[in-house]
Amino acid sequence: MDNASFVFPAVKGIQANKEYFTAMVPLEIIPKIFQFANEELPPEIRAQRVLNKSRIPEMRDYIINNPESYVFSSLTVSVDGEMLFEPINDVDSMIGHVSISMSARFLINDGQHRRAAIAEAIKINPELKNEHISVVFYHDKGLKSSQQMFSDLNRYAIRPTKSINILFNSREESSIIAKDVIKDVSVFTGLTEKEKTTVSNRSKALFTLSAISAATVELLKDIKLDISQKTGLAVEFWNEVALNMPEWIAVMRHEQKSSDVRSNSICSLSITLVAIGHGGNKLLHAYPQDWKKRVANLSNVDWKKDNPIWNNLVFVNGKVAANRSSQKALSTYIEKIMMEETDENNGKSNQK
């Protein structure tokens, strides 16, 4: 090997009968030695996907905003050049240093967006340059092998559901509030699917955590309060909504099966919860002192699926239309109902 080399502390391993190394690399080095492949090349002669630059700012800000708690998984890199492992003690030691020729060509098989985010983050906070990320180095066996490696690394990569992301997220305000809402709103407690974004046929749940979170985000839009106050307001709102949703209460009291409600009603659908959150947001802004009176309008809504009003509003060709236009249409419809004046003598809304 020539004298000009990168040297990193590393652990040697064997995988598929091939030698590879896991090294600790300073963040400062990452953008300098790991370059992107030519994005102008046709896909069939590239070994990695084209960089999606729209992802970089979010990943960069994640590092910048969480300097004491950010976590990045290892980069996986193929090295087209010499690599020499030197054991720290004896020839059989798996711990030592790996020397990689500076003339070697590096190809990121997995982690190119992390590499770009690191480069951008260091520009904003130079102190990050002395921190480290683990890099797994493989010997480059050519284009076909690198393409297969990319395919294999991503073959079983399944994104976690929105619900479980929220459940495990203790950093974002919306996730924190959603979890507190489920805990403190009686009808949500015990009736919320916290891992999946859909409720299975045999489940006792009525709602999903992702739906409650999305609806609560809609509810609290442009509300200028601290997180504790927002949480209290959200809990108060959803408890009030529950009082005017007979199907929810019936399931909570074990008077009706959740499966029957899900089969016959739209009252627990994600699109419905978000629409109610939207209507609630309009109430909170327009009637901050007496919004509860108008939430009572929800008790007059026929949520049954066979109600013709839901055709082309919620259902298209018999199926729930989970798209932006349907969500907007239903939200506008529910907002109109919730904003109507109520007749305090009979508790019914007055159509305008």
Image (cartoon, rainbow, N blue to C red):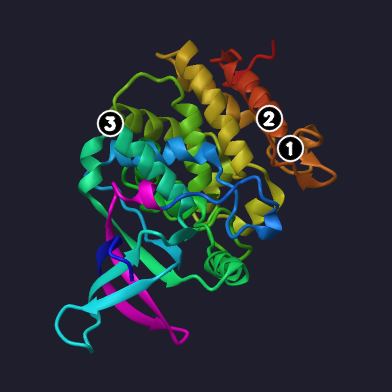
The residue carrying pointer 3 sits among few (fewer than 14), some (14 to 19) or many (20 or more) residues within 10 Å by Cα, namely: few
In the image, what residue type sits under mark 1?
Val
Query: Which label was assigned to residue 314?
Result: 1
Per the image, the residue denoted by label 3 is 228
Residue 68 drawn at (x, y percent): 21, 45
Horizontal arrangement in the rendering, residue 266 relative to residue 48 (left or right): right
How far is disc 3 from disc 1 in space, using C-alphas? Answer: 34 Å
Per the image, is 106 magenta? no
Horizontal arrangement in the rendering, residue 85 relative to residue 59 (left or right): left
Find out whether the residues at labels 2 and 3 contact each other: C-beta distance under 8 Å.
no
Query: Which label was assigned to residue 339?
Result: none
Which residue is rendered at x = 24% and y = 42% of the image? Answer: 128
Residue range highlighted in magenta? 10-33
The residue carrying pointer 2 sits among few (fewer than 14), some (14 to 19) or many (20 or more) residues within 10 Å by Cα, namely: many
Find out whether the residues at labels 2 and 1 contact each other: C-beta distance under 8 Å.
yes
Horizontal arrangement in the rendering, residue 266 relative to residue 208 (left or right): right
Give the mark nearer the N terminus: 3 vs 1: 3
Per the image, the residue denoted by label 2 is 330
Q: Disc 2 on helix, strand or loop?
A: helix
Q: Nearer the viewer, residue 213 or 187?
A: 213
Residue 191 drawn at (x, y percent): 48, 54
Q: Disc 3 on helix, strand or loop?
A: helix
Up-down: is 319 above or below 23? above
Q: Disc 1 on helix, strand or loop?
A: loop
Q: Quadrant of the C terminus?
A: top right
Per the image, is 11 magenta? yes
Q: Nearer the viewer, residue 303 or 3?
A: 3
